[in-house]
Image (cartoon, rainbow, N blue to C red):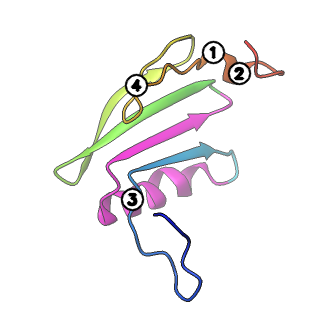
Amino acid sequence: MPALPTDAAIDAVPDWVCEVLSPSTRAYQLLVKRRLYARVGVPYLWEIDREAQTLSVLRLEGGRWVDLGAYRDEEEARLPPFEAAAINVRAWWSDDGGG
């Protein structure tokens, strides 16, 4: 989207959504929001679980989420839909973000 609309709500479906699971809304995020994203056709969903220190990557196929894997200690993960860029997942769990 080259510019944010000023006169209407955004109705474009994102190519990717990243959710940070929180203890107070975990069930809502996993049960309600995950279904909503599938219904509107979001192709990729990442779910970050700070307590478990994991990143789950999912892809929508035929209206269902396919689990592409869980990541925790990878320093150069190439994760869909951003395979062109290496992501240091391990650094996410450190207090300073630097690994």
Marks 3 and 2 sit apart, C-alpha to C-alpha, by 26 Å
Q: Which residues are magenta?
A: 25-51
Secondary structure beneath dot 4 equals loop
Residue at far front of view: 2
Q: Residues within 10 Å of mark 1 (few under 14, many from 20)?
A: some
Q: Height in image: 5 above or below 26?
A: below
Q: Height in image: 98 above or below 65?
A: above
Question: Can you tell which of label 4 and label 1 is closer to the viewer?
Answer: 4
Residue at far right of view: 96
Secondary structure beneath dot 2 equals helix
Residue 33 position, x and y percent, is 47, 59
Please tell me which residue is depicted at 59% across the width and 83% down the height of the picture: 6
Label 1 near label 2: C-beta < 8 Å?
yes
Marks 3 and 1 sit apart, C-alpha to C-alpha, by 27 Å
| Residue identifier under label 2 | 93
Q: Does the segment drawn in magenta span residue 47?
A: yes
Residue 99 position, x and y percent, is 73, 12
Secondary structure beneath dot 3 equals helix
Which of the numbered marks, if any, corresponds to residue 37? 3
| Residue identifier under label 4 | 84
Which of the numbered marks, if any, corresponds to residue 90? 1
Label 2 near label 4: C-beta < 8 Å?
no
User: In the image, 5: left or right of 13?
Assistant: right
Marks 3 and 4 sit apart, C-alpha to C-alpha, by 24 Å
